[in-house]
Image (cartoon, grey):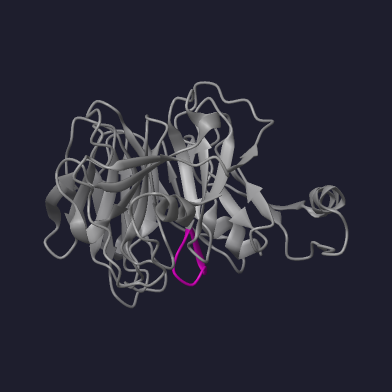
Amino acid sequence: SFCTLLRSFEFTTSTMTRHLLYDLRNARLPVSTPNSHRRRHLAKEIQLTHVLSGHSGCINSIAFNDDASLLLTGSDDTTVCLFDTLTWTRRATLSTSHMRNIFHAVMVPGTSNTELISVGLDGRTCVCRVREGSTSLAETDVITRKILNRDNCIASRVAFLGASSRTAYVARSSGTVAVVDLRLDREVDEFCPSHVDLSRSCNSIAVSPAHPYLMACGTDLPPVCMVDARYTRREGAAFLRIATPGAMQSAGVGGMSFNEAGDKLVCSYKSGDVFSYHWTTAVEHSDRRACHTADVAWYPAKDMGTQFTLCEAQRYSGRQNRLTMFKEAAFFDNDRYVVT
């Protein structure tokens, strides 16, 4: 449960430059008690176990590698720290090619911890490669640092489709998603998921674990754009836009993620609440056939994306959001909880 939570959930702190790690491995979750009792019980069982230091600036990103043996952190100080998750000691602090704040840093899947990619406030997508077989992951093990693309906009999130993909998808404040090929080390394409207003920032990307080509894109517009990465076009890439009535007055999507089954989506809205829903319900009620197999194709709609208002969404209230750029949300404990 501990690894699941941290692998899925990334957070930003504006006042601290340290990670506070909470251990849920010994939390007792009584399935037979009412939900209200479960919530109180879980909150009491969470304990602070480690404080990880190493950055001199605000920490904007945390992420596990493929086997959860390393924890990566990206910061305003333009460096990436790697922590051993067995001993919780800092293995390395790697400099990058960024000139300004790092917003997201992850290991490239399927590279055995030899490549990490990061995006940030300077609009750059940077890759750092270390010597294959290196066990120290020290600064001296870095063999190449490359800037894969440069834009006059913010690059906020990076995502990969599948465990062996060499193509990165980067969300940008220009309202587009950049397609970066790591085999060529350059940007090869871009598309606009919202196709409504190019001036609206693309803030977040979530990839479905069950559908290897399906991604959800969140912009400064309230509807979530569902995109099939195999059938994108420069404008109007979404095959469906999902709106929830309670979020229509928000400032757009700040963060989101799928559950492990890939049939539910949780969205955290800027200046608004958190909503979770079965996105497949919107497909079933729209003019598109609901599909649950990996080889199904969802083509972009000719009318620039059918919009469907989903009234069956679960709403989670109680937070206050003010002047924050990105907010994360994730499912936890077999979808019994939403963490945000």
Asked if residue 61 shows in the view, the reply is no
Looking at the image, residue 130 sits to the left or right of residue 84; the answer is left
Looking at the image, residue 264 sits to the left or right of residue 149; the answer is right
Between 162 and 241, the residue placed more toward the observer is 241
- Residue 319 vs 182, above or below: the answer is above
Looking at the image, residue 10 sits to the left or right of residue 131; the answer is right
Q: Quadrant of the N terminus?
A: bottom right
Q: Position of residue 35 (x, y in %)?
A: 81, 52
Between 280 and 145, the residue placed more toward the observer is 280
Q: Position of residue 218 (x, y in %)?
A: 38, 40
Task: Give the magenta range.
Answer: 64-71
Residue 136: quarter of image: bottom left
Q: Quadrant of the C terminus?
A: top right
Residue at horizontal 55 percent and vertical 40 percent from the top? 311
- Residue 151 vs 97, above or below: the answer is above
Residue 207: quarter of image: bottom left
Residue at horizontal 42 percent and vertical 32 percent from the top? 222
Q: Position of residue 138 (x, y in %)?
A: 38, 62
Between 100 and 224, the residue placed more toward the observer is 224
Residue at horizontal 54 percent and vertical 49 percent from the top? 277
